Amino acid sequence: MAEPKTNELMEKIVSLCKRRGFIFQSSEIYGGINGFWDYGPLGAELKKNIRDRWWNDMVRQRDDVVGLESSIIMHPKVWEASGHVGGFTDPMVDCKASKQRFRADQIFFAAVVVDGKTVGYVSALESDRTTEDLQEKAETFKRKKAIQGKLELVQPKDFTEAKPEEVPLVPSPATGEPGSLTPPRGFNMMLETNVGALRDESSVAYLRPETAQGMFVDFKAIVDTGRVKIPFGIAQIGKSFRNEITPRNFIFRSREFEQMEMEYFISDEDDWQKWHRYWIDWCRNWLLSVGLPADLLSEYDHPKEKLAFYSKGTTDIMFRFPFGVQELWGIAARGDYDLSQHAKFSGAGLVYFDEASKRRYVPHVVEPAVGIDRILLAILCSAYCEDQAPDDKGKMETRVVLKFHPRIAPIKVAIFPLLKNKPELVKKAMAVRDLLRPYLTVFYDEAGAIGRRYRRQDEIGTPFGVTIDFDTLGEKPELLDTVTLRERDTMQQTRVKISELVPLLLEKIR
Ligand code: ATP
């Protein structure tokens, strides 16, 4: 199977998404708006399948997790208590020459050291080959300046680690020249709005930057009204908003995105590491269950010294995207920080009373947090492939296939009458469509040669195709009321009785 090269692959995926109605740039007819995306008919189905599956596995199939849908705009104090007003910042750097803006932790730089002496600096934007980029730039630098001596291997650092005296010496990634980058400064990523008729400071509110705070703020209401007993979790799916400095990599980093988060409350005396491991494994298995290949997943433990002071441990499940290995799902052990902060700021008693031990305490929490858009992108990237298949005349041609797991494929089965100008075939095909429709997402297609119709479905990842031909109508009496069932990946076709289609397909999709 041909494996397209990295960026070429991203370009192909972006173009396929646009061409076939998965994802469009938001407000495109007005020139677009950076960091916002629209999901078209197929994208909306795919996203819904991911969302529904997570909700089913996380909430409906478990006794210990309940669901929540809290409001997007909450009392502004929520974000003071959570630390977002004061600290939800990314380090921002401006290039005064190009007027471009960067995230400091995405600019990498290194000293060019020859015979133990620093002779200059090179920089590169973060990629999956940052170190190689910097090394090549250092070699070019030395050659261009005709410096003699032995060039040492570069030691990359990100721009947040630049010493004040280094800042003016690091070249801007935009211009390649030093002197135009500002020192990093904090940029708050919360999007503001005003609530009510007055537009002054007292009416400022925020679009939530994460869904998690809803679970902490409603903790007491859920404990008081529900059937929950520690350990238990509260799960929520919903939109979040971050004014990202550099939205990029298609839907990977956007300003409006959708999260699936769960707060799992445990006793302050329980072994948090056990639960942390449990949820890392749960998340990894869930990703495998929607078809992500194990060899593209890895784990990254945040180093202790980089954790927030309250955090006990954070592990990210990473995915190898075509643009590098990046965070997909973060699983954080957050201690009792969030509940304690909200208790302090609101005055509400956010303690839990344990009936058995008659003890009151503030529960600790383990939080798996993931973005649906990122999962969807990971699914698209790993599902995309090109192979060779014969066209209607038997000539080999390149076939583009999205090998979605049938569970999450936007359309499960396509229905084709062999010919559209034969009313008996069309009538029968429509009857098959109506038979399947209550159980599965189906797509009826009668336009063009059958081979073309197969290709169109392969390209949008439809796992099964059902063709109604003259044998279905009884041309060969022993084949009356049978159809061909074609499998997307193998392209193999089998003859199946119409009456057996529903159970057979449901079994394959489950
Ligand atoms: P990053 O370091 O990539 O900015 P983060 O560590 O700030 O992410 P969290 O605050 O832990 O992310 O958010 C939880 C999850 O939400 C992430 O693992 C990711 O899947 C998703 N997510 C966060 N920011 C974005 C974004 N701007 N666009 C799309 N998804 C996002």
Image: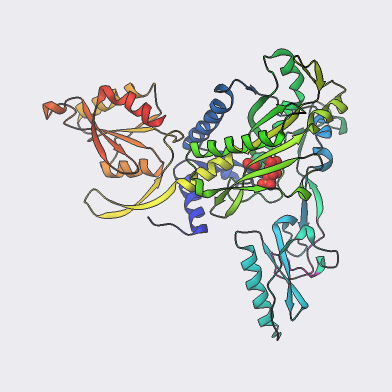
Q: For the image shown, how many numbered marks are present on the structure?
A: 0
Position of residue 100 measured from the top left corner of the image (x, y, whole percent): 72, 58
Residue at 67%, 35% (x, y): give it: 274
Residue 433 in view: no
Q: Where 181 sits versus 216, above or below?
A: below
Residue at 69%, 32% (x, y): give it: 211
Residue bounds of the magenta highlight: 169-183
Position of residue 300 measured from the top left corner of the image (x, y, whole percent): 64, 48
Q: Residue furthest front?
A: 357
Q: Where 142 sits versus 397, above or below?
A: below
Point out the image quarter for the C terminus.
top left
Q: Does the magenta run of residues contain 480?
A: no
Majority SS type along the magenta span: loop
Q: Nearer the viewer, residue 123 or 256?
A: 123
Quarter of the render that holds ligand 1: top right
Point out the image quarter for the N terminus.
bottom left
Residue at 27%, 28% (x, y): give it: 429
Q: Nearer the viewer, residue 286 or 424?
A: 286
Residue 37 in view: yes
Q: Where 149 sits versus 61, above or below?
A: below
**Colour scheme of the rendered structure:** rainbow
The quarter of the displayed image where residue 161 is located = bottom right
Position of residue 110 measured from the top left corner of the image (x, y, whole percent): 73, 68
Q: Where 80 sits versus 123, above or below?
A: above
The quarter of the displayed image where residue 132 is located = bottom right
Position of residue 5 measured from the top left corner of the image (x, y, whole percent): 48, 59
Residue at 52%, 29% (x, y): give it: 53
> Does residue 153 appear to the left or right of 406 in the view shown?
right
> Does residue 165 appear to the left or right of 479 in the view shown?
right
